[in-house]
Image (cartoon, coloured by chain):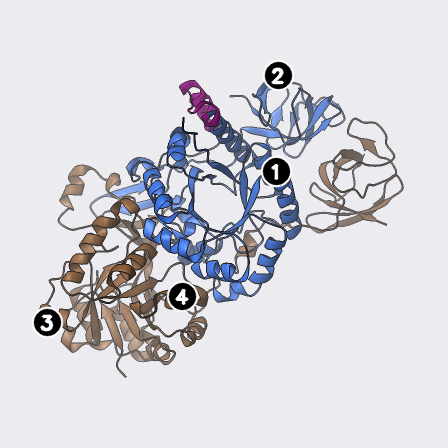
Amino acid sequence: MSHHFISYFSDNFDQTNIEEIILTDTNLSLNHQNDIVLDPSLIKKNIYSIEADRLIETNQFENYYTILKEYIDQGVKLIRIKDLGLLDRLFQDYSDEVKVILNLETAHHNFHSINFYEKKYGDFIDRFIISTEITFDNLKEIIQKLKTKVELYVLGPILLFYTPRKLLSNQINEEFQQSLEDRPYLKASGTSMESPHSGFSLYENQAGTLMYAPNHFCLLDMLEKLKSIGVDFFRIDLRGLPIETRNKIESNYLKGLDEESYQDFKNLYPHRILKGLFVVNKSKVLFKKLKNKTLENIQDHVATVVEVVKDSHLVFKQETDRVLKIGDEIQLLSPDKREKIVKINQLKSISGVEVDQTRQGEHFIIKSIPAISVKSKIRKIN
Amino acid sequence: MKQTFIPELLSPAGGLDKLKMAVDYGADAVYLGGQEYGLRAAAENFTSEQLIEGVRYAHQNQSKVYVTLNSFFHDEDFSDLLSFLKFLEEIKVDAVIVSDIGVINYILEKTSLCVHLSTQASCVNEYAAKAYADMGVSRLVLGREVSLNEAGKIKKYSGLEIELFIHGSMCMAYSGQCVISNFTAGRDSNRGGCAHSCRFEYELDFEGQKKVESTFMSSKDLNGLELLNHYSLNEIDSIKVEGRMKSVHYVSTVSKVYRKALDLLDNQGQIERQQFQNLQSELLKLSHRDYTLASLIDPAGSESIYDERNYDPNDMGIVGEILEVVNQEFCLVKVRTPIKNLEKIEIMPFEKNNIVLDQLELLDVIGGKMERANPGRLIRIPYFDGLEERNIIRRFN
């Protein structure tokens, strides 16, 4: 079964499954690396899409829009965008002339958010680019409910970070910078000094600075499964690979991979590959571990312990109007779940005066109680 | 004479104590997170009971409460959302802050809650703003890449209220677009688990020709105090202070400084140089990275990068806060950082000028002398007119 591939190159256009070529522009695209000369015959066949995937601040918007219009005037009918403002402006101006491929790879991980665009912009959206952080099972459910076609990224580097600030050029002197300026970008490799990660690819260009993961993303072994749930288009990004490797991948590995060819592919591909969060996304599971247990809340308490001095005293704040009196039994629950039940035999105000009962909002002193620490909660037992 | 436009002061409330402090020190509104759906999973956050108490306290003091629901949802996250939204409606929170376009529409369809668009949605131009206005959003928290001038234009074009950050830590990436933490630490930064990988030091290798060690992705902290009148001129409706994870010292000091600055602007139409310097010196007392204006005037350049790793978030400036004023005789103070006998301290009332004590005689809770008090201990300090519960005590520098 053939698949619809989308790529940034056109070297072997006629011999591969590649059906769409993504154009990038130094003024429009997040990651522009190579200029492609537009082939008029391919324009007629609607082969090109232009990647205009930046977020655009107000002061840059008109200039950006003017450059994008030049592509539309040349006959490019498919525009890859991310910015909601650009989507809305194109919808106002060009809803009969072009279609957009809406990039929802970040910030859109549920049906409701994707469906919003389908409801509002209808056929103006040719297809959605869906996030690879959505797991396969969830993606299946979402696609079943959508009318619009879906594109998924299946091979290439993983974009981690995007800022409009220029973060590389200020790290090197001007002379060295000039020696690298025969390209539209500065490139570096990053190694974390504080975590075990190395091999981040970094680019600085007109869009700002981009950071890519050390490992690449690959779902080539899942193409049939993806197609069976309704993924219509598969995007690959082979930029940065040696031309021979690129050609081999385009010729041999875009038909889908069985176990054996997957192993061959892994041997050929110059980066480690992973499926990221696509198969299992447990990034929320860890959250509970971030919490400090001592901050867990115990309800129904009347007071909270604010100071404990071992073998001396304990100070608590009376927080509710259920006051404590001499003779009352109280239950003390420490943040680490230790429990004591004691009877109040002596009670002092914070001025050191003996009192019969507490008052809401004030602090009181009793004798210290072993195992009971600060932040322990006090409950009144009848 | 045209009246000076005075924005709302919006302070962070990482927990109930910080909410009360922010309100006491002059915040017109606070923003906070519940136990779910926010972007600060490690923060104390608010239980339902604390939310009720927080809203009660804020409203009693004429302040508003905005609740963050600004994570990017996966389908599974919707299951308990409606009951939480109904609860927020019932306790009358003033707005919810939301990033996810699906969640925005869900809330607008199913509740009467007022929706503010979170900065996480990276709304940075007027056309996106108008699209959000058409949806029914009432306020935009603009992306940190937007200048004051652009913010003014966006307000005019969209007709929406505009909220813009004025102080605090900055994401280097477009908010909501960064997934470093997801792929390196398995923690989804857009669901509250950010590991702050952008603050790490990296070795940069420029294609084998040059190597540099640098915290090149770490941004300096925003400090827009000197541009407060520009916020006013552009009619920015709300100035936002970042920092739900930050200390009570930070929340109280920043709230007091910006409250005072806004009041000066209101009363005098401008802030005099000396007044500005006094206020700025208060902000310098806080633990902070170097300050920057980021993109408030021009797009942030290389001077906005904090190329150091020695930021110490543990704030040693604070001594503690007043827990109780006892019969106008003495104040009971909870110690937060170690203090020695006879140190010089200053007490920060909510509105009045700070009170300086040259030598604080350390007394424990029962009046016994101490040479040193460690964090968690209670001490007595002398009472002065105007001191109140939750006033901050700090070292005098």
Q: Distance between the residues labelled 3 and 2?
A: 86 Å
Provide the residue designation for mark 1.
Answer: B20
**Residue B350 included in the magenta stretch of the image:** no
Tell which residue pokes out farthest to the front in this image.
B1
What x and y, as percent, mark residue B84?
59, 58
Residue A41's disc number: 3
Viewed as shown, does residue A72 lie left or right of B158?
A: left
| Chain letter of the residue carrying label 3 | A
Nearer the N terminus, badge 2 or badge 1? Answer: 1
| Pair 2/4: label in front | 4
Amino acid type shown at disc 4: Ile
Viewed as shown, does residue A160 lie left or right of B245?
A: left
Colour that chain A carries in the picture = brown
Q: Nearer the viewer, residue B151 or B100?
A: B151
Relative height, residue B341 to residue A65 (above, below) = above
Query: The N terminus of chain B lies in which quarter of the figure?
Result: top left
**Mark 4 residue crowding within 10 angstroms, few (<14) / some (14–19) / many (20+):** many
Mark 2 touches mark 1? (CB < 8 Å):
no
Q: Which residue lies at the image location 45% right of the left edge and 20% below the top edge?
A: B275
Dot 1: element? helix
Task: Give a yes or no on whether discs 1 and 3 share a subunit.
Answer: no
Provide the residue designation for mark 4.
Answer: A114
Amino acid type shown at disc 3: Ser
Colour that chain B carries in the picture = blue
Range covered by the magenta-colored residues:
B265-284
Q: How far apart are marks 4 and 1 (CA)?
A: 39 Å
Dot 4: element? helix
Q: How far apart are marks 4 and 3 (CA)?
A: 34 Å
Task: Give a yes or no on whether discs 2 and 4 share a subunit.
Answer: no
Assign the magenta stretch its main secondary structure. Answer: helix
Dot 2: element? strand
